[in-house]
Image (spheres, rainbow, N blue to C red):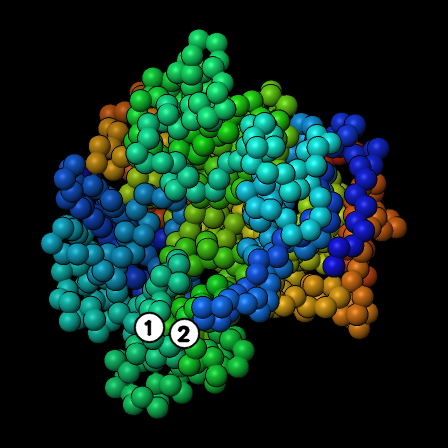
Amino acid sequence: MSNELTLEKPGGAATGSGDALLSIKGVQKHFPVLDGFLFKRQVGAVHAVDGVSLDVFQGESVGLVGESGCGKSTLGRLVTRLLEPTAGEIRYNGQDITHANRKELAPIRSEIQMIFQDPYSSLNPRHTVGSIIGAPMEINGINPKGGIQRRVQELLETVGLNPEHYNRFPHEFSGGQRQRIGVARALSLNPKLIVADEPVSALDVSIQAQVVNLLQELQRELGIAFLFIAHDLSVVRHFSQRVAVMYLGKIVEIADRKSLYEAPRHPYTHALLSAVPEADPDDNRERIRLIGDVPSPLNPPSGCRFRTRCWKAQEKCSVEEPPLIQLSGSLDGHLTACHFPEGDIKRSPEEGSTAAVPEQRAEV
Amino acid sequence: MTTQAKPEEASSAGSGGDQPFLSVRDLSVRFSTEDGVVRAVDNLSFDVAPGSTLGIVGESGSGKSVTNLAVLGLHNPDRTEITGSIKLDGQELVGASNRELEKLRGKTMSMIFQDPLTALSPYHTIGKQIGETFRKHTGASKKESRDRAIEMLTRVGIPQPTTRVDDYPHQFSGGMRQRAMIAMALVCDPKLVIADEPTTALDVTVQAQILDLLKDLQQEMGTAIILITHDLGVVARTAQQIMVMYAGRAVERGTVREVLKAPQHPYTWGLLSSMPSLTGDVSVPLRPVRGTPPSLINLPTGCPFNPRCDHREQVIGGGCTTERPPLAPATGHAAACHLSAAQRQDIFIDQIKPRLG
């Protein structure tokens, strides 16, 4: 299954050049399915992530979108090495960490941090905010200038909380504030890469915007790279310079934001975008109704995995798996895995300005 | 607080000309807790016309779910104080006995819950759960109710309904469970369906399927729908009327076009400008509403939105902290704000509209 997926960073893309901060190649994660009494034997495997290649560069934000069960969270956990890949290679800053053990990982773990989805279950209710945010420093034996408490208070201020509240417990905070605590904890070791797994999907719209703005400020000011995992396409578009679309364990399309949202080539990306409801009564974009659900990752379809729900599928799709390549007519760095890609339906005439689009929407 | 309601304020949100099917007037719901009295819903009035869809939008804790649980009479009466009037097809529901309500629930009005996995019983087959409501209200036999369940599953688009009817909820996927929930809610052809965040737990592609299904079924059966959601996009796609709730009160109501295209209340502005869109300019940061929603035990005096409002200083006379603004005008597009209509129009055109892109 591990295709040679070349994902070389093209020169003309949105972010800085140089070596990738994080580079994953053909990574797979198969979870065994066991059966039998007393003597367990493997009867199958859930192909959660199946040959994914992706580069994240210093200071850039890569968005990862897809429906539930497409393997995006598993990929996040592989990157932070909370899970060990079945196959493939993960390199962080040039160092191979695919099968690194605990000891080897220790210095790297302080540079890759994670923000979790649920602000309620990701904070220990029996610890004060101060000890939650200070724990990473304690564990790593870091003694910042002025002591841990002072650093905790600084961090609280950075994320927009009252520094005097370091002695409080998580239950004294609202959902949005708790998510800020999670952010402060992720920041405590000055990480270079943050994996944010659905960081705002549990929050109300107005609070969601506050947290997105906070993350964006941090990214700009501290130059932290983000792997931003979410299912909300509008939020991902707002936050990430490059976006990868996953379907059933594979990346089906990856491109910089403008190219992906304005000229999607993969039918699945197109369908996803057309399904997003916009708060505009005049929104009469063409809508594509996908039929049915995502197939089971226990037994993914042969060939192209999207073919069971695709309206363009032909015989070739069931036989041959489409490689993730740059199609003719796509911009640099826009890779698509499809035999029968979409045309340039939504491509705007001028390349430079996204500003032209919103103007049309504003009419009453 | 109850005395502030003016009789004219109680007007039709579903001003379609026909008699409203559901008419709520001055509804207040209060819970007594250890910390004090929670005013979950405060003086709320709205109407739903037959066959139309009302979208209720608001953040968590704004009272949108509580309102609709009150309509269905699902609150614990020992702890809840409900005042005002809820009329369903002319029948008063506040103070109605449990027996009367039982006759209505599932038959005339029914509910689609947010999380189908917790709302369905894991011990009973889907067919049994759908058929149960039907048997209770029509006295049908087991065989008949099973046939009816199959018919309903076909209607909501479940493949192979004759075999699927004997499946348990865990054998269904998320989208199919939600379809089964809809089948259950519609089994007795109710006149009013309350859908409480019916698509929040679902992926966008499945969400689109479910919203289309609800719309199709509504056209087929002429059901009135109350759609509770926090997603303005969902409302734009499905509803005709919108009511925006904040801290247990309606702060704005009108048709979808009025509220989304020319919003009048600062809170609605805040909601709209905090939502990223698929086409907006990405270099402009989002403009969230400042602060957090107020505690319903200890509401701010005057307008409950005043601590988070950016336009408080512009109010002539400064009544924001002292006087609660009524929802005015009585009919049509209305907002509860002390700013004058002309001021709101100016602020919206000068500051808000460019931001929305």
Which residue is rendered at x = 14% and y = 64% of the image?
Answer: B96
Quadrant where the C terminus of chain A sits is top right
**Label placed on residue B123:** 1
Which residue is rendered at x = 24% and y = 71% of the image?
Answer: B104
Which residue is rendered at x = 24% and y = 52% of the image?
Answer: B25
Task: Tell me whether the residue at label 2 lies in contact with that at label 1, contact meaning CB atoms closer than 8 angstroms.
Answer: yes
Is label 1 in a helix, a strand or a loop?
Answer: loop
Q: Position of residue A337 (x, y in %)?
A: 77, 55
Which residue is rendered at x = 67% and y = 27% of the image?
Answer: A59
**Label placed on residue B168:** 2
The amino acid marked with disc number 1 is: Tyr
Residue B3 in sight: no
Quadrant for residue A21, please give it: top right
Residue B178 in sight: yes
The amino acid marked with disc number 2 is: Tyr
* Left-right relation of A201 to A28: left
